[in-house]
Image (spheres, helix red, strand yellow):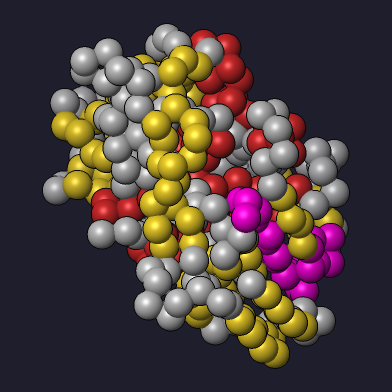
Amino acid sequence: MRLSVTVRATKPSFLVTWIRFSSTASSSSPAVSLNPSGRLQQTLAGSVEVKGKTLHSGKISTVKLIPEIAGAGRYFEFRSRVIPASIEFAQESPLCTTLLKEELKIRTVEHLLSALEAKGVDNCRIQIESQSSDDQEVEVPIFDGSAKEWVDAIEGVGINVAQNHVGESVEKMVAHVNKPVYVYKNDSFVAAFPALETRITCGIDFPQVPAIGCQWFSWRPLHESSFAKDIAPSRTFCVYEEVERMREAGLIKGGSLDNAIVCSAKHGWMNPPLRFDNEACRHKILDLIGDLSLLARGGNGGVPVAHIVAYKAGHTLHTDLARHLTID
């Protein structure tokens, strides 16, 4: 199997010159298959509760992570109703990923789900409460704009092998990409290529903001602490000149220099120091892991075994790729 990709990223408009893939696999083979991972499904060793301010609504919400049996998967519980953390319930929304079931919404789920997926918490009941008992939607707390607090909470309580309702452990299955799958809009795209291991490569380009500019970062989970060390601390970011427009649209009501890194086109980063030189690009990988975690069903893996390549992509393209990778 040989994969050859040539791209040019020297202009504000990204040009994919060509992508060529050649494979000895049968053309009739499925694009995605579910294979044994050699690992057992896991859950939390105990419950943990956190409370914090939300980014877009500015309200306070409370989240309690509770162990679940093998096969239950990850799901939210809001107002005594269950909303699975599944791509089937993902709704397109600006600047975050939202789950919608009937009239209830859970917003900004990506950082929490990214931490649960990367730390191997395959089965988890996520109770979430808003300030008001009659709210029809609720948002996950933003904390400092990263996934660090979620990782700390998970590591603090610990992880156990999950057992099903008859006390048996269950092997975790994971999706493998067998053929290239991609989605795009204009010069933005996300693609999944066959690979022997999971790798995520992300590129961003902000020519109007020199301090961000064009960045690329490639990451793979080399060991158990890779996500906590390399990805989780990276914070959400925004361009200062776009803040007023976002607020007029009813977004980032809870945004501040304490829960995001903000960059001005003229003056550069307004709240240094950065945690990484390419923190903005790393945060895109954090978001992508959270969005692809929505592929998980029944305690199996979410992010597939593949080389995922994203350029100038956001939550809409991330979840669109997840839908294309769904196994019926």
Whole-percent x, y for residue 179 in the image: 50, 72
Task: Specify the quadrant that holds the N terminus.
Answer: bottom right
Q: Say above or below: 163 vs 325.
A: above
Identify which residue is drawn at 80% across, 67% down.
Answer: 213
Q: Position of residue 282 (x, y in %)?
A: 70, 49
Q: Position of residue 281 (x, y in %)?
A: 71, 55
User: 112 or 5: nearer the eye?
Assistant: 5
The quarter in which the C terminus is drawn is: bottom left
Residue 254 lies left or right of residue 131; in this view the side is right
Q: Residue at x 41, y 35 (%)?
A: 172
Give the magenta-colored segment's residue range: 196-215
Percent position (x, y) of residue 79?
A: 19, 28
Res 208 quadrant in image: bottom right
Q: Nearer the viewer, residue 55 or 170?
A: 170
Please report the residue visible at 77 percent of the width from the left and 74 percent of the height from the top.
207
Q: Looking at the image, can residue 169 be seen? A: yes
In this rendering, position of residue 270 left or right of residue 169: right
Specify whether residue 80 is painted magenta: no
Residue 240 visible in the snapshot: no
Of 188 and 298, the residue lying toward us:
298
In-image side of 134 versus 214 (left or right):
left
